Amino acid sequence: MQEIVLEFIETLRNKKYASNSISSHKQDLRKFFKWLNIEEDNSNNEELLEILTKLSQSDIEEYIISLDKNYKPRTLSRHISSLKIFLNYLEIRGIIKASPAHRLRFPEIIPEAPEILSTEEVISLLEAPPLDHYLGLRDRAMIELLYSSGLKVKELLKLNLEDIFLDLEFVKIKSKRERMVPITSKAIEILRMYIEEGRSQRLLNPADPCLFPSRNGTRMSRIGFWAMIKKHAHRAGITSPINPRILRHSFAVHLLQNGTDLSDIMNLFGYVSLDATLQYAHINRPDFFDIYHKLHPRGQKNIEEK
């Protein structure tokens, strides 16, 4: 690979880009160079730089049009991002005068409706772990809390005993934005049982603050939790696709279907803006149309009353 590209990749590493992101940018650039008729095994740095200095905005737009025929908006956005980052790097280095990708616009991405479980399926999953054994009690407490409060798996697994405030009915989540999330009464009931009867039986060290230890007494891994979810889904006879993310989506959609606002979901999830909740925008409150017609100046009920 050309020297300038290797230097660019090293810059991304120094900026702490994720390895998956770096790999994606590298593959996107290879595709772009192929479109420029620069073969992958050609390591001639001067030839590449000469071509790049002559690139125009119309060249970049033509390339994006060629991609648009075969890629969905999300993938197309990633290619545009790769080009912008790389060409901006060349501009900063003084290799090109100005990036021809400055005016490129990202395509509109319409979030797909998330997969969810029905309320009946969630109840079956919640009731699958047996409560006559400490592991079943732990599993039930974990799934109840995950669905009760819409936590991410990594948030759930990082919880310590001190983060649970059962009397005040909330859990403290320590993430980029620390937040307090309410807990349902059923989750509180199961958590009390688990903390009093099951938690201490698995801890290697009684002073360990870990709320949900694994079989070996240490903090549970994501893989371990995923295996546990699948086991209980099978026990409950659930044939729908299921993973911890789907359970989180189910939490959000079920709340929206019962009248919760998107802004409330934003706060529960710890999102910074409503944009992050757009995947749930298709979910209407049961009274959505009634409220719409009642409050809109041109609504049907307003017109009838006049």
Image (cartoon, grey):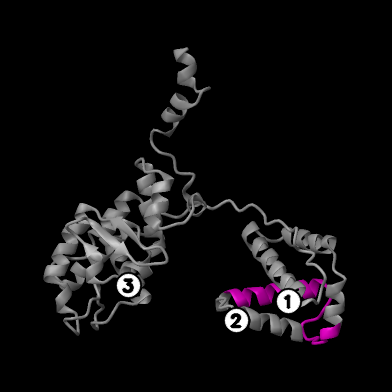
Q: Which residue is mark 3?
A: 158
User: Residue at horizontal 37%, vertical 43%?
Assistant: 260
Percent position of residue 264, x then y:
38, 48
Q: Is residue 286 above or below residue 47?
A: above
Q: Residues within 10 Å of mark 1 (few under 14, many from 20)?
A: some
Q: Amino acid at mark 3?
A: Lys
Residue 13: assigned label: 2
Percent position of residue 13, x then y:
60, 81
Identify the mark nearer the N-term, 2 or 3.
Answer: 2
User: Which contiguous range is marked in magenta?
Assistant: 21-46
167 left or right, relative to 4: left
Name the main secondary structure of what is drawn in magenta: helix
User: Residue at horizontal 16%, vertical 81%?
Assistant: 206
Would residue 240 be seen by someone viewing this image from the given angle? no
Q: What is the count of numbered marks? A: 3
In which quadrant of the rendered view does residue 165 lie? Answer: bottom left
Which element is circle 1 on?
A: helix
236 left or right, relative to 83: left
Q: Nearer the viewer, residue 55 or 75?
A: 55
Residue 30: assigned label: 1
Percent position of residue 180, x then y:
31, 58
Q: Amino acid at mark 2?
A: Arg
Which element is circle 2 on?
A: helix
Q: Residues within 10 Å of mark 2 (few under 14, many from 20)?
A: some
Which element is circle 3 on?
A: loop
Q: Amino acid at mark 1?
A: Arg
Q: Quick check: marks 1 and 3 in contact, CB under 8 Å?
A: no
For discs 1 and 3, the disc positioned in front in the rendered view: 3
